[in-house]
Image: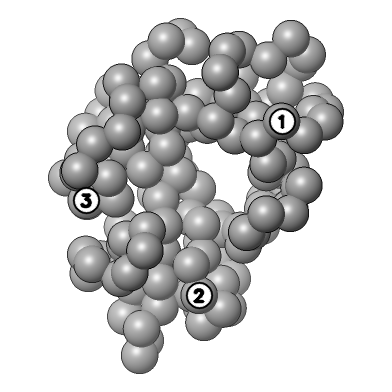
Amino acid sequence: MILISHRGNLNGKSDRENQPDYIEEALAQGFDVEIDVWDIFGSYFLGHDEPKYLVKKDFLKNDGLWCHAKNIQGLYSMLEDNIHCFWHQEDDVTLTSEGYMWTYPGKDLTKNSIAVLPDNKPDVEVAGVCSDFIVRLV
């Protein structure tokens, strides 16, 4: 099962969410990481509510990153640049560019689902889990 740190968090929410060094720390511990990505005038930025941290395209090409496009240009650019990405807001499920089913909390799961922010390990087989408390699911 793929274990995905939500915005770099391992043991709960942090004010360091989406900071590049925080993401690298989670990757170094062997976790994948979901990050929030914006494209502003041709440059990539990380940040949940707004673009905050400028990053290079090569940073986003890390195999362990799951890039949540926060604006439509971000989605378009990441698809053009072959970066693993997805767009969602409150959809029950959305497909990532690699074909995983990114599944809204509390919705039905499949073997190809990424369970997002579950309270516990899912009772059914899933492809992965994305959590702020990912170390609890190891």
- Name the side, left or right, on which 134 lies relative to 72: left
Residue 112 occupies quadrant: top right
Q: Position of residue 37 (x, y in %)?
A: 41, 64
Three-letter amino acid code at disc 2?
A: Asn
Does residue 58 sit above or below 79 in this rendering?
A: above
Query: Callout 1: 10 Å neighbours few (<14), some, many (20+)?
Result: few
Q: CA distance from mark 2 to mark 3?
A: 18 Å
Residue 19 in view (yes/no): yes
Question: Label 2, on which residue?
Answer: 71
Q: Is residue 29 above or below residue 57?
A: above
Q: Residue at x 33, y 69 (%)?
A: 50
Amino acid tagged 3: Gln
Counting from the top left corner in percent of width and height, residue 58 is at 33, 62
Where does the image place residue 137, in percent across and percent down from the top left?
48, 11
Element assignment for label 1:
loop
Amino acid beneath label 1: Gly
**Sooner in the amino-acid sequence: mark 1 or mark 2:** 2
Judge the density around disc 3: few (<14), some (14-19), many (≥20) Cα neighbours within 10 Å. some
Classify residue 87 as left or right of residue 125: left
Please rate how many residues cluster around mark 2, counting C-alpha atoms within 10 Å: few if below 14, some from 14 to 19, many from 20. Answer: some
Q: Residue beneath label 1, please? A: 106
Circle 3 is placed at which residue position?
19
**Mark 3 vs mark 1: which is more N-terminal?**
3
Decide which of 110, 81 is in the foreground and name it: 110
Is 91 or 99 nearer to us in this picture? Answer: 91
Residue 11, image quadrant: top left
Callout 3: helix, strand or loop? Answer: loop
Identity of the residue drawn at 65% across and 30% down: 115
